[in-house]
Amino acid sequence: MWLQLSLPAGDADPQSVADAFTALGALSVTLQDAADQPLFEPPPGATPLWSQVRVTALFEAGADIARIKSALAGRFGADCVARLQIEPLDDRDWVRAWMDGYAPMRFGEKLWIVPTGFEAPDPDGVNLLLDPGLAFGTGTHPTTALCLEWLDAHPPVDQVVVDYGCGSGILGIAALKLGAREVWAVDNDPQALMATLDNAERNGVADRVKTCLPQQFSGLFSGVQADLLLANILANPLIELAPRFAGLVHPGADLVLSGILAEQAESVSVAYRERFAMQAPVQHEDWVRLAGTRRKT
């Protein structure tokens, strides 16, 4: 038996509430949307939160609830305790329960994401071993799916690939399993780089992945030009990065951009047209993918 304590953060800093639960002995703490507010994929390194956040903590059944309430009241006020919800939870395999809502996903003709505990539906396909998650992307978001579908249709055989804003490394790892020679995975968040390396190791491609922060990338990649650049971030960073991206790829190289809402597609495309021959956007739900080829002149 466990106890689940749930608290709308209100005016309090959600991370401070989470830290307080952890200090009081919580086994796990999660931050959740308390008002059904959409939250789009962040730019690399960003950690956005909803305007109204619920902090949920899991405690052992014998936790001292009176002490927890007293500590929360002392730090966040008596109103905080009035909002606290306490619910007993039966023992169960929480990891398995979390995974039950997922299954292998196919992108295009042969590319699959296969979570832990599942057999690959197509043993002859290109199978990425990757578990669903919230932080770094695993194919469930339309922007990631759009990029994976492009890769399936355009295998980057023997190419040098840049995965800018790599997150979990899903796009770079897919590129490697589709034949890329090497991938440069770039992200502002060191945890994303660690996740990329872990996922690359799991998929047997870690020896062909180079991870680095953006400030390291310019020096390490000096003198190299990529055959393919993938960037699944957001519209404004993509617009700002257009000149830099143009300098990272050789003439004739491919560019794939996502993280773009349909109404933003034209402004992003305009930022790239001087240097890239841009194709018409491809839309999935409210999101689009833009692809182009680096102009030779």
Image (cartoon, rainbow, N blue to C red):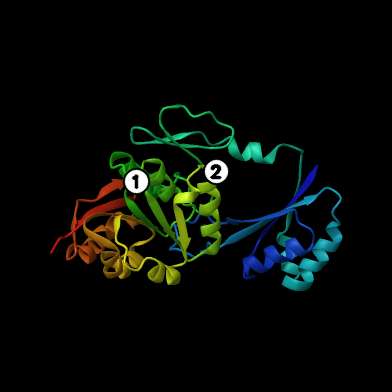
Disc 2 residue type (three-letter): Arg
Whichever of callouts 2 and 1 sits on the residue coming sooner in the sequence is 1
122 displayed left or right of 50: left
Q: Secondary structure at mark 1?
A: helix
- Residue 231, label in figure: none
Residue 68 percent across, percent down from the top left: 81, 62
Residue that carries the numbered disc 1 in the rendered image: 146
User: Which quarter of the rendered picture does the C terminus lie within?
Assistant: bottom left
Residue 102 percent across, percent down from the top left: 53, 36
The correct choice, above or below, for 220 with respect to 97 in the image is: below
Which is more foreground, mark 2 or mark 1?
2
Q: Residues within 10 Å of mark 1 (few under 14, many from 20)?
A: many
- How far apart are the alpha carbons under marks 2 and 1? 23 Å
Instruction: State if disc 1 and disc 2 touch (CB < 8 Å).
Output: no
Disc 1 residue type (three-letter): Leu
Q: Does residue 133 appear in the picture of this structure?
A: no
Q: In this rendered view, identify the residue nearer to me: 97 or 159.
A: 159
The correct choice, above or below, for 97 with respect to 227 in the image is: above
Q: In this rendered view, identify the residue nearer to me: 34 or 102.
A: 102
Residue 148 percent across, percent down from the top left: 37, 44
Instruction: Tell me the residue at 77%/69% (across/down).
Output: 73
User: Which quarter of the rendered picture does the N terminus lie within?
Assistant: top right
172 displayed left or right of 59: left
Instruction: Tell me the residue at 75%/72% (across/down).
Output: 75
Residue 215 occupies which quadrant of the picture?
bottom left
Q: Secondary structure at mark 2?
A: helix
Instruction: Tell me the residue at 53%/61% (across/down).
Output: 50
Q: Residues within 10 Å of mark 2 (few under 14, many from 20)?
A: few
Residue 198 percent across, percent down from the top left: 56, 50
- Residue 202, label in figure: 2
Instruction: Tell me the residue at 24%/64% (across/down).
Output: 267
Q: In this rendered view, identify the residue nearer to me: 74 or 195.
A: 195
